[in-house]
Image (tube, rainbow, N blue to C red):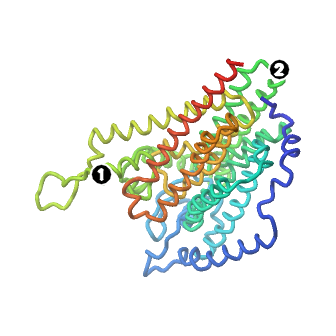
Amino acid sequence: MQSLVGSNELADKHCGNAMAVFSSRYQAIIVLVALAIWCWLDVWPRGRLDPDRPELHRTDFTVYTKAGEAALAGENLYAVTNLRGWRYLYLPPFALLVSPLARLSEGWQCILWFWISIACLYGAIREFTFLDRWAFPRAWTEKVDRLATWGGIVCMIGFSLSTLNCLQRGQVGLFQLYLTLLGGRMILTGATRWSAFAGGNILAGGIILKLSPVLPASVLIGGMAFLTLRSHDKSIRPIVTRSILVSTGLVVGLAVGIWLLPASIVGWERNQTYLETWRRDVLARTYELSNDPFAGDSHSRKNQSPMNGVWLLGNTLLRVEKAGDPSSSETEAPMDLPFGKMLQTGVRVTSILATSIVLLAVLWRGSPSSLLVAFAVANAATLLVVPIARGHYFMAMWPAAVWAPRWLMQFNPMQAEFQLSCWWLTQIPPILLILHYAFESTSGPLGVLGIGVWVWQLLLTFAVLIAILRDRNILVNR
């Protein structure tokens, strides 16, 4: 494995203009104009508030500003709701961060957050491009064929639908994705110890926003230590120091972000009360699928986690009338019976095992690109083991869907069948997203997206194991 320390030189050598997102300023102008039109015609009307017609208010962002305003006023930020009755479900710091926007009208709050999210999207693309060219420099010098071009178009359409849904609803997914990729890039490609510490701080910011980056951050830190322990090359030992610095930055960032900064604004005791309320009323209630009055209906067809996908499909195929009063119109959900619960648990356990196998196999390869792929796979795996994963969450699969198959292609670059199989691994997630958004009324109750990404994970696991075993046999035969 090449040392991560001093890897800026390697990145500069291969990346060139890797940070460029648009090939010309005219493309950027066209995209910005199109986004401005869409923002004015769709995002702003969704954010406007009409007390007589609350159903027209279809954004999540006012939940955050309302909670922040309540926290500054000394109220329970988890008790207040917006006009639609939606509650705040995140840790207190983000509500306090956006609380100044509560002074604006609801429509303008959404417009401002829309453009902040666009800036985060731009930053995420830049970080993705830089990491992609850093880890896979050869791929950028090869001739691009029609199959690769078509695959890129499918990926762009599929993940754009998820991204646009996030922008439309005023969600925090793009902010989180940017922080995750930025933190990963600073840790992997930064040449100084300060960059490792700062990368840990940035990953802490993503965790404070939503808990899902805990897994990729842990894999990145643990992966560096794992690669060092199994290597006999003394030149790799400084990575241990780097992993310690990342861990320190992560812990310091969490301590400052969760306790010190909020306490300096609302007071230590009130912040502790907010944290305890979040643990009791949010974290504990969203761990399993339920129809909770606080967290909402996790059995909605918009929730496409693999667990709920199986629940939806099973109930769609097996639903029976509830026993009891013949005049009752209520129905019983078969997947809430013991067998259904066991099946959902099996899906989660399988996802955890498959993720663990992929991570160990990838890290065993021992290279900078392996560490990056493990980081991306762990970020995507959060959607496969949690009970709630709505459509716009699946933006998190974008790096893994591209990097994991590209990493696999390095094992047997001359075999056309193997290359085609890897190409299909890239295409499955965006195709599932296209089906989900284009035919949600039909595909949603069947759990197509949730079950599909679960199957994709199993296929990726088999592909990684086969590639590792073949590679080992080739080395032994040599």
Label 2 CA crowd tier, 10 Å (few <14, some 14–19, many 20+): few
What element does badge 2 sit on?
helix
Question: Toward which corner of the image does residue 84 lie, by quadrant?
Answer: bottom left
Cα separation, mark 2 vs mark 1, equals: 57 Å
Quadrant containing the C terminus is top right
Q: Would you say 444 lies left or right of 125 here?
A: left
Callout 2 amino acid: Lys
x and y, in percent, of residue 202 in the image: 72, 47
Q: State the mark number for residue 30.
A: none
Q: Is residue 362 left or right of residue 325?
A: right
Q: Residues within 10 Å of mark 1 (few under 14, many from 20)?
A: some
Instruction: For the N terminus, give its image quadrant.
Output: top right
**Dots 2, 1 in contact, CB < 8 A:** no
In this rendered view, identify the residue nearer to me: 162 or 153: 153
Lateral position of residue 365 relative to residue 2, left or right? left
User: Is 174 located above or below residue 456 in the figure?
Assistant: below
Coordinates of residue 314 in the picture (x, y in percent): 31, 48
Residue plotted at (25% across, 53% down): 319
Position of residue 283 measured from the top left corner of the image (x, y, whole percent): 48, 46
Q: Is residue 199 above or below residue 391?
A: above
What mark, if any, has residue 315 been given in the picture? 1
Q: Earlier in the sequence, mark 2 or mark 1?
A: 2
Q: Can you give x and y, in whole percent of width and height, for residue 379 in the image?
A: 60, 44
Residue at the image position 83 percent from the left and 40 percent from the top = 194
State the residue at coordinates (39%, 64%). Answer: 441
Q: What's the residue type where badge 1 is placed?
A: Asn
Residue that numbered label 2 is attached to:
234
431 relative to 370 in the view: left or right? left
Can residue 77 be seen here? The reply is no
316, 144: nearer the viewer: 144
